[in-house]
Amino acid sequence: MNSANLENLSKSQLIALIDDLEFRLNEFTPQNTEILLFAYVFNLTKQEAKALCALAKGRAITQSQLRMVIAQSSDARENISKLVDVVIMKLRRKLKGHPIKIETVYGTGYVLSEGADYIAQMIEERRYR
């Protein structure tokens, strides 16, 4: 859409267009903001924070799903078979002092079995400081 098209729109159409653009922007921004917040609060790398964000949603997640979340490119998703195992191992090590438990679900992947409330509390406390 160019500026000539925008000039022909009514005020209500422009407001609707702006609202639509804001909605689209907000679909992506919270995810990145959440990742940065998780990384900051728990002193994690970006990959570890992405994994914890995915696990904090409260359901089991497969290795392939985690790989898609963690990997930066499609090449990395295909070529690194142990990426998820390494990230989960490091994440468990870093979260050892916190009441958070990541369990392996045989044949499925991983699940956050303890600590979802703790994570939410820590994130909320940090968000409003």
Image (spheres, grey):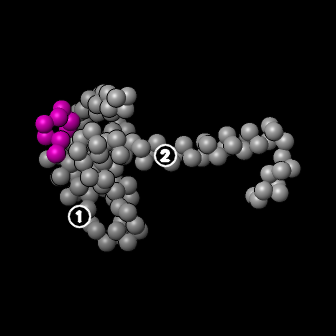
Find disc 2 in the rendering and name its residue.
29
Q: Is residue 112 visible?
A: no
Q: Could you classify mark 1 by the number of other residues whose Cα lies within 10 Å: few (under 14), some (14-19), or many (20 or more)?
A: few
Residue 107 lies left or right of residue 18; in this view the side is: left
Q: Which amino acid, by three-letter code, is at mark 2?
A: Thr
Q: Please tell me which of labels 1 and 2 falls first in the chain.
A: 2
Verify whether residue 58 appears in magenta. no
| Dominant secondary-structure state across the stretch colored magenta | loop
Tell me which residue sits at (37%, 39%) in the image.
Answer: 57
Point out the image quarter for the N terminus.
bottom right
Q: Which amino acid, by three-letter code, is at mark 1?
A: Lys
Determine the secondary structure under disc 2.
helix
Point out the image quarter for the C terminus.
top left
Tell me which residue sits at (77%, 59%) in the image.
Answer: 2
The residue lying toward the viewer, choosing from 121 and 102, is 121
Percent x, y of residue 73: 40, 66
Percent x, y of residue 77: 36, 66
Verify whether residue 96 appears in magenta. yes
Residue depth check, mark 1 versus mark 2: number of the one nearer the observer = 2
Extent of the magenta region: 94-101
